[in-house]
Amino acid sequence: MKNKIPSLKITPETLYTSRRRFIKSALKTTAASFLLASCSPKTNHDDQVETIDSLVDDQGFPATSVEDIISYTNYYEFSTGKTQSTKLAEAFITSPWAVNVDGYVNNPRVFDIDEIKNLFEQEERIYRMRCVEAWSMVIPWVGFPLKKLLDIVEPTSDAKYVRFETLYDTEQMPGQNNPSYPWPYIEGLRMDEAMHDLTLLSTGIYGKDLTPQNGAPIRLVVPWKYGFKSIKSIVRIDLVAEMPTSLWMAVGPTEYGFYANVNPTVDHPRWSQATERRIGQSGRFNTQLFNGYGEEVAYLYEGMDLKTSF
Amino acid sequence: MKLTRIQIIVNLLSLLPAIFTGFLLIQGSLSANPIQTLTVITGRTAIYLLIFSLFCTPLNNIFKMGVFIRIRKTAGLYAFYYSLTHFLVFSVVDYELNLSWIFPELTQKPFLQIGLAALTLLLPLALSSLQIIKKLLGIWWKRIHNFVYLITALIIVHIILASKGDIIDPVILGGLFLFALLLRINPLKTLSIRNLPQWARDLNTFLIQ
């Protein structure tokens, strides 16, 4: 099928740097009226605005600032605090790094992270990321479709689901000592979801390698699902016959389903899924079905009751 | 009315989270999601102050230092102020007083109903701390204030329901609350130190002046 989400050439870093500088000055002028004023660049007449504005998603939403993306993360392996993981993940070792791809495949294989970066052409995709906690960002990912990797290992006809696993290392990831959660982090996709062109394995943000707190060195990105589906720091990818039980499904089966498709009409017991707050901007947005990627992905769920298969 | 030393200290300490948060807010370093951070800070401060206020009476029983009784009301009142701010951050700042957003939330989410119930129950406690109302209420003042245990329990349930599977915070808060309750029943209730050292008496006298 035709994909209208453009794959761009990776934006040169100088552009990001100028954007960073620009955002800083914009923030300074609005700092006093922080909660009331929008921090978006539209009121500023800086020369750089035009080039910066080109960094928008398919719906024209501007990319979230790199500072916000790398400073505000949900990475419970390090901390349940959203700003604490940055510091705790500082020394996280991401090289060497191996990703073991196994299960119902003809060519099981261990990929080295450098090998992955060379083997698959890295492209930039600007996606909306909607957290289940009702906040969202627009993120310029660097990565490649998961399909390309799966094509190399050749899933057999027994493979119905893909099961992903995060590194388990309590020395490096202090949050894994928290007994509230059944570590390691597990996520899963149905085969057709995994093979969809929008589904990325990401190795970078804003043209640079992923920071540890953002899931370095390699993570999943599934833009039409809540953020927790996009598992970080992947060490295993298994092709399996049964639907995997994700960490969040194990923690709260009534709250977190396997599909976890963004859906404003299916409520979470704690967070409204009808609206969301866009990080770095004021006001609330109405949340879109499938996070606005319905045209691309709705066919995957035809005939399914999205309220029961949440 | 002249403020005693301990009142000045408690007021300053209670205002500290607000001052610190305000400073970070103006500086723009209250995380990438300042509204969420504001919600958490105001809520946390409120429950910790409320639980602290529950320790004042037992501490006074044990140490016979009047200073604890004199800070109980202030701690309780600040718990109310932070709770109210917590609610205003939710309703005004986050949901922009948009009833078509707020109403479905309130009808669907038990944790919000429980939180709102706790705040509503706190209101008469806060109002009746005014001397004139306290006198009018007579014996009812104490009866009304016994609601503080129910309110604390409600807030802890509110936090459990609002947390994403994490059990550490609820365990700490629940543990502190249970401890404060244990100190109110025998044998701990009658626990007291008979011969308080002179310096402690002096400190007490110094603080309540």
Image (tube, grey):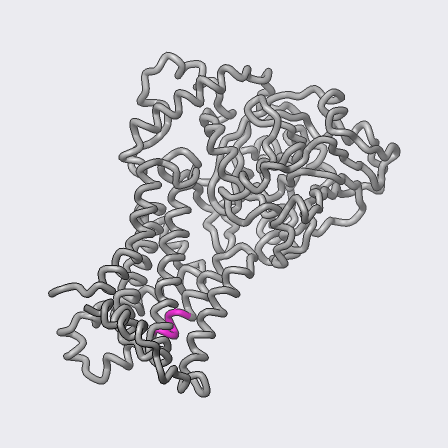
Kindly identify the residue that appears in the image at 79 percent across and 41 percent down. A239
Q: Is residue A136 rendered to the left or right of residue A103?
A: left
> Residue lying farthest top?
A47
Residue B123 visible to the viewer: yes
Image quadrant holding the N terminus of chain A, namely top right
Q: Based on the displayed image, in which of its 4 quarters is residue A96 positioned?
A: top right
Q: Is residue A300 rendered to the left or right of residue B44?
A: right
Indicate the position of residue A95 as horizontal and vertical percent values: 71, 31
Q: Return the residue nearer the eye: B82 or A261.
A: B82
Q: Is residue A306 rendered to the left or right of residue A284?
A: right
Q: Is residue B180 rendered to the left or right of residue A199?
A: left
Indicate the position of residue B201 as horizontal and vertical percent values: 28, 75
Kindly identify the residue that appears in the image at 69 percent across and 49 percent down. A184
Count of all numbered marks drawn on residues in the image = 0
Seen in the picture, residue A276 relative to A39 is either above or below; the reply is: below
Indicate the position of residue A225 as horizontal and vertical percent values: 59, 40
Kindly identify the residue that appears in the image at 61 percent across and 53 percent down. A308
Q: Does the magenta stretch include residue B202?
A: no
Indicate the position of residue A49 as horizontal and vertical percent values: 39, 16
Q: Based on the displayed image, in which of its 4 quarters is residue A114 positioned?
A: top right
Q: Based on the displayed image, in which of its 4 quarters is residue B122 positioned?
A: bottom left
Q: Does the magenta stretch include residue B149?
A: yes
Residue A4 visible to the viewer: no
Seen in the picture, residue B22 relative to A152 is either above or below; the reply is: below
> Residue lying farthest right?
A106
Kindly identify the residue that appears in the image at 54 percent across and 54 percent down. B164
- The magenta region covers B148-152
Instruction: Please name the predominant secondary structure of the magenta segment in the image.
Output: helix
> Residue lying farthest left?
B1
